[in-house]
Amino acid sequence: MASLPFVRGALLVSFSVLLTVVLGFGLPALLNAVAKCCGFPETSVTECIVGVYFMFVLYVATPRIPRGSIEVKGKAVFITGCDSGFGHATAKHLHKLGFTVFAGCLLKDEGGEGSKELEEMQSDRMKVVQLDVCSEEQVNRAVDYVNTHLDDSQRGLWAVLNNAGVSTFGEVEFTTMETYRQVSEVNLWGVIRVTKALLPLIRRAKGRVVNVASMYGRMGNALRSPYCVSKYGVEAFSDCLRYEMKAWGVKVSVIEPGNFIVATGILTRDIVATTAGKLWREAPPGVQEDYGHAHFDKHMALMRSYCSSGQKDVQPVLDDITDAVTSRRPFTRYNPMEPHWWIRMQVMTHLPAAIADRLYF
């Protein structure tokens, strides 16, 4: 009896040959048949490939097709991480659209600038609440506040946007287990904690759960393992929740932003310098000796170069969040990112890893 590795290898080779034959002969033949049925002359293989590529480009470039919108009046949303960045901008944007916004801010009790700006709007539809997503007590207090301030006519909470998050970097051997825990506590467990607390209100309204993940929730990258681990978790949690909530009429969407470092200020040269010093000081002596300062400094210089990169306007993210909250048929995933990042994500998630690794690492 043939060994399992031999059988697996034979099956992979057979599948590759079959796929090559199908794509090389079947696809052009199919396209020729379709063209003939439509009354067009038979095309060449080259023209078929060009046609398929044209449709692909059209799919990528075509603006989003409207799918109907819900009535905003009388609906309330809960947003985490409203001190700055996406959360702060989204809170103001959804308020402008007519939603009642419960804006969770980490630094409200400390007089943070972001929470002050929202409070100074002096609107009865902008309600700022103290919220550390890592604190069970603060999450429960926020939920009590929402219950107290929802109108009877609102029939629950229409949407929760889990946006609060932190970012970090560093090679695996330089990153402590405490760092992995801290990042996941905010980026993943915070999402789960807030969602579980608000789900009864969301189910009552047959509303939405919108989780902000990242393109790094779909593909890994060097120096970003703590962040990637937490965002992969958000993706998995969102998928599982979507399956479970379908019976309740609740829709779950994931926002996967690309590089918005400049727009959000989530990574600055000061942050890189502080983090780099901490990484080197806390690394075991053997790791310091094996890697060497030259290697370490090279990667820290790479992180510094990222501080001035990325999109400068958060509007693409706001547009996708708004669609996820207001569309009658929201998408499962949204990808607000630059074209080269979108292509990289498709390559790394759909092509064999050997090809993706050769192209990008």
Image (cartoon, rainbow, N blue to C red):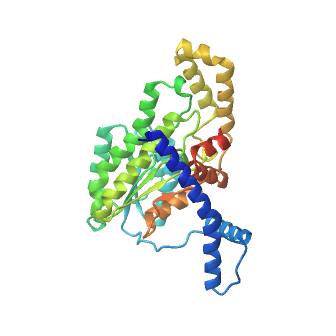
Q: Which is more toward the observer, 138 or 223? A: 223
Residue at 61% over, 61% down: 21
When asked about the image quadrant of residue 70, the answer is bottom left
Image quadrant in which the C terminus is located = top right
Residue at 59% over, 64% down: 22
The location of residue 289, given as percent across then percent down, is: 61, 13
Q: Which is more toward the observer, 64 or 307? A: 64
Residue at 51% over, 26% down: 175
Left or right position of 300 against 175:
right
Q: Residue furthest front?
A: 1
Is residue 162 visible in the rendered structure shown here? Answer: yes
Is residue 166 visible in the rendered structure shown here? Answer: no
Image quadrant in which the N terminus is located = top left
Q: Which is more toward the observer, 165 or 178? A: 178
When asked about the image quadrant of residue 318, the answer is bottom right
The location of residue 72, given as percent across then percent down, is: 41, 69
Using the image, determine if residue 105 lies above or below residue 152.
Answer: above
The location of residue 108, given as percent across then percent down, is: 42, 42
Using the image, determine if residue 286 lies above or below residue 184.
Answer: above
The location of residue 252, given as percent across then percent down, is: 39, 58
Using the image, determine if residue 57 lies above or below residue 121.
Answer: below
Using the image, determine if residue 243 lies above or below residue 73.
Answer: above
Q: Which is more toward the observer, 282 or 264? A: 282
